[in-house]
């Protein structure tokens, strides 16, 4: 069984009554709930817990980490970022949601600013599936339509994705690379754009299906990380 940790700042839910109404159990609670309904073993962690809830024990027992952050990226300790990054390189999957594009973890793994255009204006969003054979979009159809969402627009300052899975169109005219996969070391990463905190995006069944599919896709495979550095020869080297 895949073991998932859903990480969330859990700050908006405490400060904004609109967010608290949309996600009474927190964004992490909403995501954990639909993953549990799929038979996935889930725990949650939040920013204000000791070590942000991401202790060595928790990370060692996490196959896939789901990350949502927004207003407190700078409060995440560099030590935790280092530990999460190392776990990804060693095979842990990472699903980065919405404004997590600006998290220390994602920027470290991408090596770029991860900046973009944005607008909060109740734009309609249509997420087009541009890689219909990808397992992340199984059961989705040609697109997902969201009545209201925050706009993210290009240019999105990320490395070229290994695979582009979704391309969004917004009512105001922008487009955005909304579903991107990467491999870093032994780990697999999926960035998925939708999920502004004041909208019920994570209650949408197709959004839930994408995240569930992504968790299964990003789960570690049984391969040891390669050994680096000075290497002894496998065969005897003849003297010339």
Image (cartoon, helix red, strand yellow):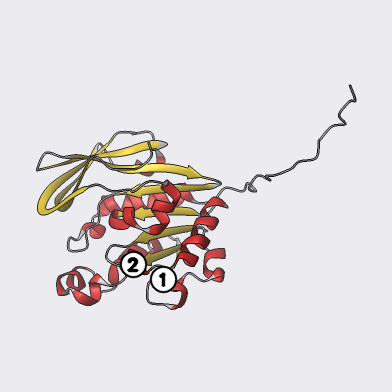
Q: Residue furthest right?
A: 239
**Is 202 left, or right, of 172 in this rendering?**
right
* Up/down of 217 relative to 21, above or below: above
**Is 116 left, or right, of 93 in this rendering?**
left
Which residue occupies 24% across, 73% down? Answer: 13
Q: Secondary structure at mark 2?
A: helix
Query: Is residue 180 or residue 215 the one in the foreground?
Result: 180
Q: Name the residue that disc number 1 marks.
A: 45
**Is 21 left, or right, of 88 in this rendering?**
left
Q: Residue furthest front?
A: 240
Other-residue count near label 2 (Cα within 10 Å), few / some / many at <14 / 14–19 / ≥20: many
Q: CA separation, marks 2 and 1?
A: 8 Å
Note whether residue 38 is visible.
no
Which residue occupies 55% across, 46% down? Answer: 185
Residue 71 picture location, percent across and down: 27, 66
* Up/down of 156 relative to 209, above or below: above
- Residue 195: image quadrant is bottom left
Which residue occupies 11% across, 39% down? Answer: 173
Tag of residue 32: none
Q: Secondary structure at mark 1?
A: strand
Query: Do the residues under discs 2 and 1 have CB atoms within 8 angstroms?
Result: yes
Which residue occupies 52% across, 69% down? Answer: 58
Q: Name the residue that disc number 2 marks.
A: 28
Which comes sooner in the sequence, label 2 or label 1?
2
């Amino acid at each position: 069984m895949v073991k998932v940790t859903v990480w969330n700042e859990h700050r908006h839910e405490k400060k904004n009554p609109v967010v608290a109404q949309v996600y009474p159990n927190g964004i992490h609670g909403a995501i954990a709930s639909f993953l549990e309904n799929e038979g996935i073993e889930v725990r949650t962690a939040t920013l204000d817990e000791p070590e942000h809830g991401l202790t060595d024990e928790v990370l060692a027992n996490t196959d896939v980490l789901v990350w949502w952050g927004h207003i407190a990226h700078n409060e995440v300790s560099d030590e935790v970022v280092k530990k999460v990054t190392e776990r990804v390189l060693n095979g842990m999957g990472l699903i980065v949601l919405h404004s997590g594009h600006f998290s220390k973890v994602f920027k470290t793994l991408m090596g770029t600013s991860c900046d973009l255009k944005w607008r909060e204006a109740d734009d309609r969003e249509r997420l087009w599936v541009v890689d219909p054979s990808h397992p992340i979009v199984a059961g989705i159809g040609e697109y997902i339509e969201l009545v209201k969402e925050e706009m993210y627009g290009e240019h999105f300052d990320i490395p070229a994705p290994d695979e582009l899975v979704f391309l969004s169109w917004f009512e105001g005219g922008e487009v955005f690379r909304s579903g991107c996969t990467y491999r870093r070391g032994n780990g697999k990463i999926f960035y998925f754009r939708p999920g502004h905190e004041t909208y019920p995006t994570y209650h949408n069944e197709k959004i839930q299906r994408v995240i569930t599919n992504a968790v299964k896709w990003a789960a570690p495979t049984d391969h040891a990380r390669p050994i680096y550095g000075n290497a002894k020869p496998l065969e005897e080297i003849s003297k010339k």
